[in-house]
Amino acid sequence: MNTLFVAGHSKLPTGIAATHISESLTLTLELDKKYGVIVDASCTLATDHGREYIKNLLKGHSLKDGLEEPLEQLNAAYLGKAGNAIAAALKDSYKQYQLHL
């Protein structure tokens, strides 16, 4: 297999739909081994639409380039209450990726 699977976790804010399912958010990334490019992503937001949006927002970014660009796009485009939790889970995923290098 030419990909890696990394997962990041964070605490969700209270009062949003996803907290009825779980108090934490999990973000999983499938990465190209050679280039660190996100080829697929999934998260535990409550709605299909939210999960698909985050997936499309993250796909194509290379973790070898760091997190600045995907975090900027997330902050500019995702206006839901879980934005900080998604960013924290992305940072945690990045930390897991760096441990692999």
Image: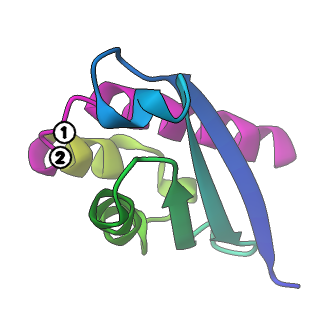
Q: Residue furthest front?
A: 20
- Label placed on residue 75: 1
Circle 2: residue type: Tyr
Where's residue 43, x and y in %?
51, 52
Is most of the magenta stretch helix, strand or loop?
A: helix
Circle 1: residue type: Asn
**Direction from residue 76 to residue 19 in the image, left or right:** right
Q: Which residue is mark 2?
A: 78
The kind of secondary structure element at disc 1 is: helix
Where's residue 62, x and y in %?
50, 64
| 84 over 52 or under it: above or below | above
- Label placed on residue 64: none
Question: Which stretch did the figure color magenta?
Answer: 76-101
In this rendering, the label closer to the viewer, 2 or 1 = 2
The residue located at (35%, 69%) in the rendering is: 52
Where's residue 81, x and y in %?
22, 29
Q: Quick check: marks 2 and 1 in contact, CB under 8 Å?
A: yes
| Dot 2 crowding, Cα within 10 Å, few <14, some 14–19, many 20+ | some
**Quarter residue 95 falls in:** top right
The residue located at (62%, 54%) in the rendering is: 28
The residues bearing labels 2 and 1 have C-alpha atoms spaced at a distance of: 6 Å
